[in-house]
Amino acid sequence: MLPVRAGREDEARRMVTEALARNPDMGGGLPRNAVGLFEPGPGRRGPRFHPGDRAPPLSAALYLEFMPAGADMVYAQYELAQRIVERAAPLLEDARWYAILTQCEDILDCWELAAGRLRYERHLTEEEQARALLRQLEPSLRGRLEA
């Protein structure tokens, strides 16, 4: 959940909607597995957190959802998500997040928005080693990652 800067909501909404419309999914519709828009409000299901996590309050009027289809095994338009977030970076609050992709080996992607720019790093590891690398890179997560 990437908060949009106050006053930049319309621009972010338009940018994301246009980018998704230019890149339809395999069925011809808007892709649901790249970047989505989330507007908090009454009756809206918010983001899910692990039981031990303290959920931060939703304070922005609009959020970009990175990979909104969830953690299920789905065809993800990862490159499209990266392009959208990169273009939208000046409209977004600073944030940092990680994605672990498991294929033949584990891949740890590190994403950071800072001062209106996106920084992205990919780390290839041996199978089942991405969590260990993440614990090294982000010590604050050590107790929260599954072994």
Image (tube, rainbow, N blue to C red):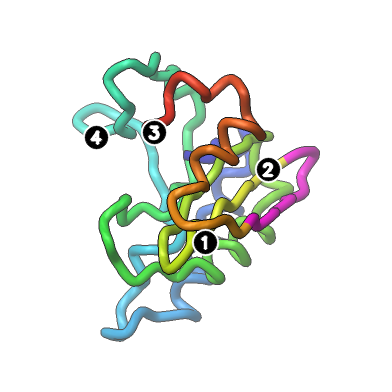
Q: Mark 2 points at which residue?
A: 112
The C terminus - image quarter:
top left
What residue range appears in magenta? 114-123
Q: Which of these two is toward me, 21 or 103?
A: 103
> For residue 52, what is the image quadrant?
top left
Whether tag 2 and tag 4 are in contact, CB under 8 A, the answer is no
How many neighbours does mark 2 have within 10 angstroms: few (below 14), some (14-19), or many (20 or more)?
some
Q: Name the residue under label 4.
A: 44
Q: How far apart are marks 3 and 1 (CA)?
A: 36 Å
Q: How far apart are marks 4 and 3 (CA)?
A: 33 Å
Residue 115 among those drawn in magenta: yes
Query: Which mark sits nearer the N-terminus, 1 or 4?
Result: 1
Image side of residue 24 versus residue 141, left or right = left
Residue 129 among those drawn in magenta: no
Query: Which mark sits nearer the N-terminus, 3 or 1?
Result: 1
Q: Identify the residue at horizontal 55%, vertical 36% (top origin).
A: 3
Q: How far apart are marks 3 and 2 (CA)?
A: 24 Å
Q: Nearer the viewer, mark 4 or mark 3?
A: 3
Q: Name the residue under label 1.
A: 16
Query: Which mark sits nearer the N-terminus, 3 or 2?
Result: 2
Q: Nearer the viewer, mark 3 or mark 2?
A: 3
Badge 3 marks a residue whose secondary structure is loop
